[in-house]
Amino acid sequence: MAESRLKILIVASEAVPFVKEGGLADVAGALPAALSEIGHDVRLVLPLYYQIDPRRYKLKARKKRLSVPMGVIGTVEASVMEGKLPGTQTTVYFIENEYFFGRPGGLYSTADGDGYMDNDNRFTFFSRAAIELCRSLRFRPDCVHVNDWHTAAIPVFLNTAYKDDPVFSSTATLLTIHNMLHQGEFYEGLMDVLGVGWEHFNYLELERDGKTNLLKGGIYHSTLINTVSESYAVEIQTPKFGADLDGVLRDRAADLYGVLNGVDYENWNPETDSHISANYSIDNLAGKALCKADLQKVFGLPQRPDVPVIGLVTRLVKQKGIDILAEAIYGILELDVQVVLLGTGEVWAHFFFGDIPNLHKDKFGCYIGYSNTLAHKIEAGSDFFLMPSRFEPCGLNQMYSMRYGTLPIVRAIGGLNDTVENLSELDNTGTGFKFYDLTADALINTVKWAVYTYYNRKDLMECLIQRAMSKRFTWAAAARQYEGLYRRAIEKKNHEG
Ligand code: ADP
Ligand code: GLC
C-alpha cells in the first residue's frame, strides 16, 4: 500500500531566502521544499520581520486576523500574509505584528548585538500564533515540526492549553535542536504569559534554576526530538555539551535522533555559481585557479597561485572556536600561507581580526561583516577551509567546501566529525584534516600538516580534492529521514493518545 501523504507544519524563526542569521535559515528554507518534492503537504510559518519585503515575494494578506492569547498580557492580534517559497509550490505563512517584528536591526538583537528585551514575548507570541493559524485555516497537521527555542513552546501549548482541541487531537510534534547553547531561558514570570498553568513550572518541564526555559519545555513535551547530526545527538547527553540540559535529554534518549542537514546544491555548485569569477567542475579545475586569483585580489593579497589559501566564513562567536583561532593565528601566519576571514559577531573579535592585516597585509585578508557573495568566493578560491569549532551541531560550510574542492580542516566534533573523513596517508583515503584537542597547538599542527601536504604531496592533494568533490549530502536524503521521524512520531502519538 502506498504510504499516506503527510500534512506537516514547519515553524521556524528564520528561513532563506527571506531572512537569515545562521544555518537554521538554510535548513528551514530547504527542508520544506525537499519534503514537498516527495509528495507531502508542507507549510512553513515565519515571522514577518521588517527585513522581509512583501512585494518582493508577492505576499498576499489573508483576510482573517488571528487573536493570540498571551496570558496576563491579554489577547494580541496578528495579521497573516501568505506566499510561496520561491521556486516551489510550498506555502509560507508570515505572522505579522508590527510591534514585535517590525523593527530594523537583527532578528534577535539590535544592530549592537544586544538581545531584544522582549524576545520572550516575541517568540511566545509567534509560537502561539502558529497554532492559532492552524485553527483558523482548519489545517490539522499530522506533525508540527518546531526548531530551536524560538518555537519550542508549541509542543508545550499543544499538550496543555490545546490538549482537548479537536484540530490537534492526532497531531504529533518533532523538535529539532540546532544549537543547545541558546535555550530561551527567561524570568519565571513568563509562565503567566504562556498561560499554561504554574503546575508546569517544575524541574522536569519548564523550570531551570528558577527560570522559565522554553527549550527544556519543548524537550519534555515534544513527541520526538532530533539534532542535526548523529554525533551531536550523543554529545548533548553529556554534561560537556548538554548546556545543563543533558539530564533532561538523557531522560528522553529513546526519542532522540540525529539527522544530518543537507546542502542546497543549486546554490552551492561551482559549475553554476554566479558569485564566483569562473565556474569549474571535478573534471576541469582550471576555473578554481581563477577563483583563487580573484579572491586574493578582492582581499588585497599578492596573487600567488602557488601559496595555499585558508578560508574562514563564520559567526565570530565562542562556539566557532575563534578564541583558539586568535591564539593560533600568529603561529599559522609564520607558515607560507594566506588566510582570508569573513565574519561578524563579538566586538573584540572584530578588532582583533580586523587589525591583523595591518601587521600581515601580505598574508591575512579580512572582511568584518556579512556577505553572501564573499562567502561563495571564499569557498571557491581557497585551498583549505578552517572550522576550529568548540561544538558544532552540524555545520554547513565544511560540506559546501567539499563540493568546491576546498579541503576542510576541522575539529573532530559533532557534524564536522560526521561529514569529514580524516586523511589517511597510508591508504590514501579521506576528504580533509581533523584535529581533536581544542588547543592552539592542535590547530596549528593540523594546519601545518595540511600545508605540508599541499606543498609536498600533490598526489595526495589531488585525490583528496577528487573525493571531497564527489561527496554529496542531499536534502532529498535528509527529507526521507525526516519523513521517517514524522511517521514514527505520529505512530507514537496515536499509540499513547
Ligand atoms: P551556524 O548556523 O552555527 O552559524 P552553519 O555552518 O550551520 O553555522 O551555517 C552558517 C551559514 O551562515 C553558512 O551558510 C555560512 O556560509 C553563513 N555565514 C556565516 N557567517 C557569514 C558571513 N559573515 N557572511 C556570509 N555568510 C555567512
Ligand atoms: C546551528 C548550528 C550549526 C547547524 C545549523 C543548522 O546554527 O550551530 O552547526 O549547521 O544550526 O542546523
Image (cartoon, rainbow, N blue to C red):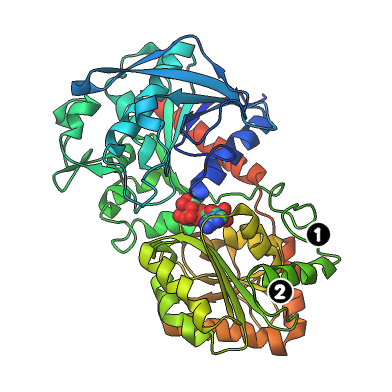
Q: Residue at x 45, y 67 (%)?
A: 389
Name the element at disc 1: loop
Visible in this render: residue 234? yes
Q: Quadrant of the N terminus?
A: top right
Visible in this render: residue 321? no
Q: Residue at x 36, y 68 (%)?
A: 348
- Residue 464's disc is 2
Q: Tag 1: residue type?
A: Asn
Q: Which residue is mark 1?
A: 279
Residue 200 placement (x, y as % from top left): 19, 32
Q: Residue at x 52, y 44 (%)?
A: 20
Residue 74 placement (x, y as % from top left): 23, 18
| Depth check, front residue: 229 or 117 | 117
Q: Is mark 2 within 8 Å of ligand 1?
A: no
Query: Looking at the image, is mark 2 or mark 1 nearer the viewer?
Result: 1
Q: Quadrant of residue 88?
A: top right
- Residue 304 vs residue 325: left or right? right
Q: Tag 2: residue type?
A: Leu
- Residue 179 vs residue 384: left or right? left
Tag 1 or tag 2, which sits nearer the N-term?
1
Per the model, the C-alpha gap separating discs 2 and 1 is: 20 Å
- Residue 324's disc is none
Q: Residue at x 20, y 33 (%)?
A: 190
Name the element at disc 2: helix
Q: Quadrant of residue 367?
A: bottom right
Residue 296 sits above or below residue 248 on the image: below
| Depth check, front residue: 452 or 66 | 66
Residue 3 sits above or below residue 228 on the image: above
